[in-house]
Amino acid sequence: MLEDISAIEAIEQSATSAWSRSHIEDEIRHPGGIALVIRQEHEGLVGWCCSRLLPPDAELLKITILPEFRNSGCGSSLLVEVMKQCLQNGCESLFLEVRKTNYQALSFYRKHGFLQIGLRKDYYGNPLEDGLILKKFLTY
């Protein structure tokens, strides 16, 4: 996975809340985490995600897909695999935060069974914005 850092960093530049290279590296190396990438034939790496395992819960920290591959199933594939690995590691639920106005992401997560359980006032910067806390109970 560390060999993919440059490609992941390039993908992050397409995100509203892009992570720095050092932040990406820290998460990939984190012992209690899951980091995954998705590749498309002839295209290379087109997306990635990472989560932290905190049994009985897990937190999805990041999922980013290149804009031209959004709505192609890549994000769903990553999310399903993360949920599967969370279950295998003893987690019963998966949490995440999302910008209040990120309607595309909200629709995506709701499609996958996430429900809003809270709000974090002014959680995001650049621009300052509330974060919605979403949760999904994991099942086989």
Image (cartoon, grey):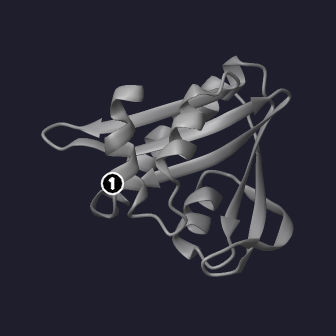
Residue 39 falls in which quadrant of the image? top left
- Compared to residue 98, the image places residue 64 above or below, namely above
Q: Is residue 140 left or right of residue 23?
A: right
Residue at 44% from the left image edge and 42% from the top image edge: 48
Percent coordinates x, y for residue 8 in the rendering: 39, 44
Q: Is residue 4 left or right of residue 22?
A: left
Q: Is residue 73 visible?
A: no
Q: Nearer the viewer, residue 90 or 11?
A: 11
Q: Is residue 44 left or right of residue 2?
A: left
- Compared to residue 42, the image places residue 16 above or below, namely below
Residue at 76% from the left image edge and 67% from the top image edge: 132
Residue furthest toward the front? Answer: 22
Looking at the rendered structure, the kind of residue marked 1 is Ser
Residue at 61% from the left image edge and 57% from the top image edge: 109
Residue 94 falls in which quadrant of the image? top right
Quadrant of image for the C terminus:
top right
Quadrant of image for the N terminus:
top left
Percent coordinates x, y for residue 12 in the rendering: 43, 55
- Compared to residue 76, the image places residue 127 above or below, namely below
Residue at 58% from the left image edge and 49% from the top image edge: 62
Q: Nearer the viewer, residue 135 or 129?
A: 129
Q: Is residue 15 visible?
A: yes
Q: Nearer the viewer, residue 24 or 54?
A: 24
Q: Nearer the viewer, residue 3 or 53?
A: 3
Question: Which residue corresponds to mark 1?
Answer: 72
